[in-house]
Amino acid sequence: MNRRKFLSWGTAGMVALCSGVVVSLGAVIRFLVPDVFYEPPQSFKIGNPADFPYGPPTFLADEKIYVFRERDKGFSVASAVCTHLGCTVKFFTSDNRFHCPCHGSVFNENGSVEHGPAPRALNWFEVTETRDGQLRVDKNKTVPPNYRLMV
Amino acid sequence: MGIRSTVGACRSGARIMGKRLPQIFFVLSTLSLVLLIAAIWQATRPSWKTYQRHYFQLEAVGEPNAVTKAAVLATPPEIHQILLPGLHRVDRCTTCHLGVDDPTMKNAPEPFRYHAGLGPHVASKFGCTICHGGQGLATDVKDAHGNVPFWNDPLLSPEYVRASCGRCHKEGDVPGVPELTEGRRLFETEGCRGCHKLNGVGGSIGPDLTEEGASHRSPEWLEQHFLNPSKVSAGSAMPNFQFTREQARSLTYYMLSLTSADMGSYYSSVRLIPSPAYGRELFVQKDCIVCHSIGGVGSKTGPDLLDVTKRHSLEWLDEQLVNPQLVYPGSTMPEYDLDTNSRKALVSFLATATPQDAEAIMAPHKNVITPEDAAIAAGKQNFARFGCAGCHGTELQGGLANPNAQGGQVPSLLHLSDDYTKDEVIAVIRDGRQPPLDNVHGPTPPLYMPSWKSVLSNEDIHEIVEFLWSKQQKAKDSW
Amino acid sequence: MNLIREIWQSIVRRDPLSTDKGKSELVFHNVWLHIHPAKVKKENMRFKHTFYLGFITFFLFLILVTTGIALMFYYRPYPPQSYQDMKDLQFVVFLGPFLRSMHRWAAHGMVICVFLHMCRVFYTGSYKKPRQFNWVVGIMLLLLTLGLSFTGYLLPWDQLAYWAITVGTNIGSYAPIVGGKLRELLLGGHTVGEAALIRFYVLHVAILPSLVILLTIVHFWRVRKDGGLSKPVWKLKPRAPEQLVTIGATPQVAPMQTIPASKDKTYGLMEVVTGKPNFEIITPEEEEDAVFSYPYAFFREAITLMVTVTSVMAISLFFHAPLEEMANPAKTPNPAKAPWYFLGLQELVSHSALLGGVVAPALMVIALLAIPYFDRNPSRRPSDRKWAIGLFTAFVVVNLVLIIIGTFFRGPGWAFVPPWVHVVAGPE
């Protein structure tokens, strides 16, 4: 065996070894990407339309959303997470405003900022009707505040 | 020198590399790369992805809009899981059983079919395994259905699934499952507690049944065991009670429902409303009137219960029902095996109870007036509640086969007073005893009198003996 | 282009590998490689001399560290979550079963290889002067390896784990006076429970691996400082003691300044002070027979690494690490067995608690630690040390036989049951 051959086999082996290392690095990163989340799902059913009253919005504490139902207009769902630093806002019927308890941000009923440090309006989530007639909210999909679902 | 030594090293290098080490190195690195890729390939192709693809195709069939159709088909596969912290479970069944909560899938082939008739028990709140068994954490068919080594809770066959209702609905009638009611009734009346402990109350001859529903025994085994114990469990001490097929089925249902696993407040108390009517039922069933009175109607052994809810807090009453001695030292009230809901129901009944209620309840007890009679009645209760009837018979007639015990069977209790004094009988109940042998060299008889001193108070035993003495048949005729 | 070269030069700082100087600098200018000598004796690289067992053990340890750290991302040391995490690894973590199996099989492999490595060192007499202390370090590493494997055994929190640890810790509790207290300290209670799990976890992922790393550094460093690998036994001349230069002994070799090629050695500093070195030195004839570590030694090490990794991966691809039902303190499996490497002791305990629980393990550890100081025979030639080899072989064989009996020949009730007989479990 000559020196050239010696090196070429070795080099090929090194190439295979290095690709192995690269692939296993990729595999380890993929290993760390979770396939299941131990948290409430991002897209979920919230129940039958009839469960929700007209008038002031219904607050769902586990999902952190406000469900609005307006006569002749339909359903819309607002996030209850303040866009400033993630506290949960509370809707007051007295002034029809969302108030954040942490730093005093105030949002109007369209979710727009009226006072305080919040940089953006509240998120509105897509709400759809499932084939079995229930309402489904998808937190992965944000919609403009004038979005309405007619049932 | 440099050149010469390099050449020399190469030559000697070639010699010491004689076994083609670079080639071996190349082959091995390639092999390890191939193995790694094989492992990744294996990991990227779990069987649930195939099921999800089939489901999306099924969904797309009924979709008229081409854009939506393409979107449905392109849904990224993902593991679905239902988190059930209240039940300490995580169910991933819906990863493949994608149509369980979609009524349009009611005619779809399994595993995609809609689950009809769930009522309030929707999959998203209850999961699947709490009723059906199986391994909720698993994501391939064989492991998920649980018929694999080292998983004790395989899928229940459809004919036994309804038994699982009893895991949360621990008391009262469960609509649609008469077997459970019947099984519970049989358990208390046939004296099963004489040998078996359940929730801490009962004998020790047979195994503790508190966790029977969580054990690995199959329903078929249980049913056979009730029909003929020694057939499936050779050498079992359990007598053949000559149960009918229906009774065996009912008892099997009850056994499958037994678990001490915490079902969480959402599943056990909120759903089963502790109504006053159910409380009244319990009041009658547990014979509370034997010791207590309501507005002066009833027995005077225990305190009067009229307006008891105004005198004590609900927590106090609840605690009193759990552990009478702890709340009220020296209380002679026995401990009853009552779950949270039953206690709530009893208290809610007491809040509304009137002397008229007591009159109505007392009607069958009209002649209970003297303390002796009260003791006899309480003794009868104890005799049934602690399962003495299991071996000695509901009429004290004895007669269960007990090989190699004197007489070959469990003795009748109808002629005790001929051979024993009351104190001797009390001693036997308190300390237990091994039956005298027919043949001293023969095998130990399977059944024996257990010691009851850790379960029954002296008062309880005294009452049982009073009851026994009230039943004695005078021997004079037989001579 | 020049910038790139400059950056590269600033990193590697050596001459081209085509030169001898470059080959040497590759080794001693590199923090990872400098534990090697620049040149190695050809005979030392022969497979039949060391079987590369030390390297295999080390590489298995590297596999264990990497897979172990990966697994830690998905593990909570708290029952019953620990068991659920095992199920998650099996069902919903990408490559979870593969990595867990690799960790499990590499752990068993490391126990085996560290033991075989010890046997090799004994049979070649390589623990003799000046290498006595490195043998002691090696025995400590053996004990730490067993400790790592044992603590890791509990973490899946299944029946196998629970009862193996219950039985295993009870073997230790037979030690007089302190045994019971030690067990309590280890378990954080009287039985294996939540407290035991967190203690075993901390030992397994923090304390024991750190100790292994520290001692491995000492172990490797001492190999160099003691003069590299010992001479293969077939190269030993009948009058072997002359190969050693010891303090106070008459030097058998030429004066130090004439030892060629020694300038390339990292321990060259030793040569500028007066006094005699306390390690094996290379004679000029032997130096002729040495080659540069690059590429010859490195190639062999790389092949050893690849053999190790490939074998562990191949086994893990086809055999998954076992996972039984969740730990249930109320249900004892019959028979309940300690981890396999302790089954020899469990076998002894079944005959005599004192012998298996106290005398045998204590004697074994003490005897192993004392071997280099107790064995006064200076010769390393097998023909000169028949007694030592005979005794050690007896020790190894007895151990193996006991472990094999305990593993394969013990059925329910610790009754003697050959593995080819199927036992139907009796009524509960």
Image (spheres, helix red, strand yellow):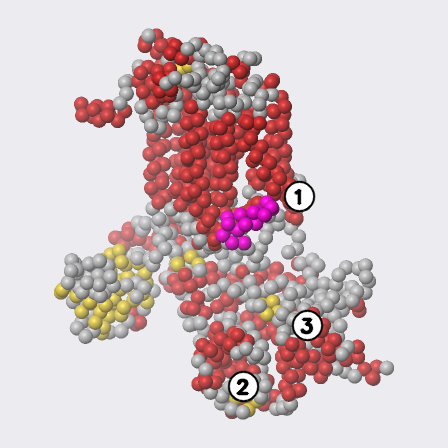
Check disc 3 and report the residue beneath it. Answer: B430
Measure the C-alpha gap from mark 2 to mark 1.
62 Å
Name the amino acid type tagged 1: Ser
Q: Which mark is residue C352?
A: 1
Callout 3 secondary element: helix
Residue B445 can be seen in this image: yes
| Chain label for disc 1 | C
| Chain label for disc 3 | B
User: Does the magenta portion include C176?
Assistant: yes
Measure the C-alpha gap from mark 3 to mark 2.
28 Å
- Which quarter of the image is occupied by the C terminus of chain A? bottom left
Name the amino acid type tagged 3: Arg
At x 49%, y 44%, the residue is: C151
Labels 3 and 2 positioned on one and the same chain: yes
Q: Which mark is residue B303?
A: 2
User: Does the magenta portion include B291?
Assistant: no
Q: Which residues are magenta?
A: C173-190
Mark 3 vs mark 1: in front: 1
Q: Please name whichever residue, B174 or C216, is drawn nearer the observer in this view of the structure.
A: C216
